[in-house]
Image (spheres, helix red, strand yellow):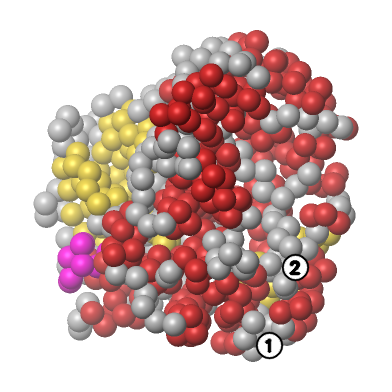
Amino acid sequence: MCGIAGYISKRKLDASVIRGMTDALTHRGPDAEGSWADAESGVVLGHRRLSIRDLSANGAQPMPSHDGRFVMAYNGEIYNAAELKEASGETKWNGSSDTEILLEAFAALGVEKTLQLAKGMFAIALYDREKKTLLLMRDRIGEKPLYYGRIGGDFVFASEVGALAAFPGFDPEPDASVLPRYLLYGYIPAPYSIYKGIRKLMPGAILKITCPFGEGRQKMGRWYDLKKKAEEAKEHPFRGSFAEAADELERLLTESVRGQLASDVPLGAYLSGGVDSATVVALMSRLRPGDVRSFSIGFTEEKYNEAKEAAVIAECLGTKHTEQIVTEAELKEVIPGISGVYGEPFADSSQIPTYLVSKLARQQVTVSLSGDAGDELFCGYRTYPQIAGLWRGVRMVPHPLRDAAGKLLQGAGIPQIHRAGFCLRASNIRELKEAVWHYDPYIERLCGERVPIRHEVLAGDDAQQMLTDDILCYLPEDILVKVDRAGMAVSLENRIPMLDRDVLEFALSLPSEYKYDGRTQKKILKEVLGRYVPRELWERPKKGFAVPLERWLREGDTAEWAAELMEHSHAAADGLLRNGAVRGLWKDFVGTGRAPRLVWNVLMLEQWYRDQYEKNKDRGTGTRLSL
């Protein structure tokens, strides 16, 4: 796991520029740094290394290929490196890093074939010295981040937006047009970023830049299309019995975990006490009996605490378990600084315990496996059945009648009634899910713009459409961002076995009733876990990795912090948000407790904005972000 950065410039190359960019990524790679430059093409690559595989200098980056044609800076892990190595043919290897294997596979097999064969998580910058082209590539589902854009006349890219800010001439101008999306979801979906002119590379995308960089010298393509894979899976579903499906899922998950155990540094796993993490730890324990370290965070508030359940499962599986009970004061202490971990506004409140459990694990290990993606792949969210039931009722009324009634309700001016009108007007279950999960009319008051809702119909039945929507959007833009940044903030590599290529595509092909049969959610995953851990140890209502957000924002130090940000909003004063709407939202929340999630979204935006303002002062500009 590492951080990468680089640029293409027509100006005279200055070593201090790339050093400044990689220094901003030190948390992603504290063990070593390196850079490479080609004066003729103006290409510069930089790298920060967190040593995981082949700890020697043979794994150092940027790395040239054996034939000298390619140079690569890469962030990630390739779990089937042995397969790629064999496919690459006979060669004399300098070391045993997956970096060298991936690079030589590109040279021997070609870029497209190598990417299709590779199983892993990655963001890659590959310079072809022969064709004078730079390729930026991102993994199938977006586990590893990659930002890119123009600063002046130069092309820049990096693992995090903070590294781009170190490039000379960076003008931190927020893109107000993305704020309705941010306030709706709590994250800024790719390809957008918080800054004008800066974009995120989409999952499965490949961006080709021909040197020297200039207008018309970029070409965007896709080497993997998850939406298309989902459509193909529904056209050719798994035809076996439920028992056969469970056997196959167990086999695929076991192989995924086996591949992700590869490491030359200490490795462990998160264990929350829920089905997803327990399944991953159970398979780890099967492969390495008595040699698995597990970690869990517990809360003093019983409603949110799963530490006891996690400890019981750890004992059953024989792991070396570490538990930390976090007080409410310790949780709250993290809040003011949490926005700095993400580089741009991000507002999933479970970012707080995720950061703390990453910090706990890093005290003993450098790599940690998690059960993330289980909810999205196997229908784990409690709202899925609720939304499906609501949609069955709503669609019984012809859409023209619902649309007319919804418009009337939206004109009432009462938030709850306005939202009901939005639900009535939904033309498909994806729109209804957006309305139920995310929509709040206050967003339009805050931004003065209509909220962009995803209208496209996805393949499959109602349950499959909701699952696919979350796999395409919520999983990469929220869950994976949260996990990556929280781990990297403490120099910890997080791995997610359920996002193995074969597990992912198999899950997409499963009939909905194998995941949710009207009574049991994550049915097939629970079948696999039940083969290792007695059901009475984990079969209970889902708690999730949540915090008592509404109560925190209404009492004590956190309420004072929130009140100061909301009542004296810098973002509103500078025109990003409407000042009266920010105060109105806060007043409404204090009086009624309404919309705590939207309040949190605004708070994380405001805290991020103030942090950037302070950085501008440190740079000597003495100004806020320009608009």
Q: Nearer the viewer, mark 1 or mark 2?
A: 2
Q: Which residue is mark 2?
A: 540
Relative to residue 30, is residue 206 drawn left or right? left
Question: Tag 1: Cα neighbours inside 10 Å, few (<14), some, or many (≥20)?
Answer: few
Q: Which residue is mark 1?
A: 290
Closest to the observer: 161 or 25?
161
Q: Say if residue 144 shows up in the picture.
A: no
Image coordinates for residue 627, horizontal then vertical, percent: 46, 14
- Dominant SS type (magenta): helix
Residue that appears at 64% across and 31% down: 598
Q: Amino acid at mark 1?
A: Gly
The residue segment tinted magenta is 107-115
Label 1 or label 2, whichever comes before in sequence order: 1
Question: Tag 2: Cα neighbours inside 10 Å, few (<14), some, or many (≥20)?
Answer: few
Relative to residue 509, is residue 527 drawn left or right? right
Badge 1 marks a residue whose secondary structure is: loop
Q: Amino acid at mark 2?
A: Arg
Q: Say if residue 548 shows up in the picture.
A: yes
Residue that appears at 14% across and 48% down: 132
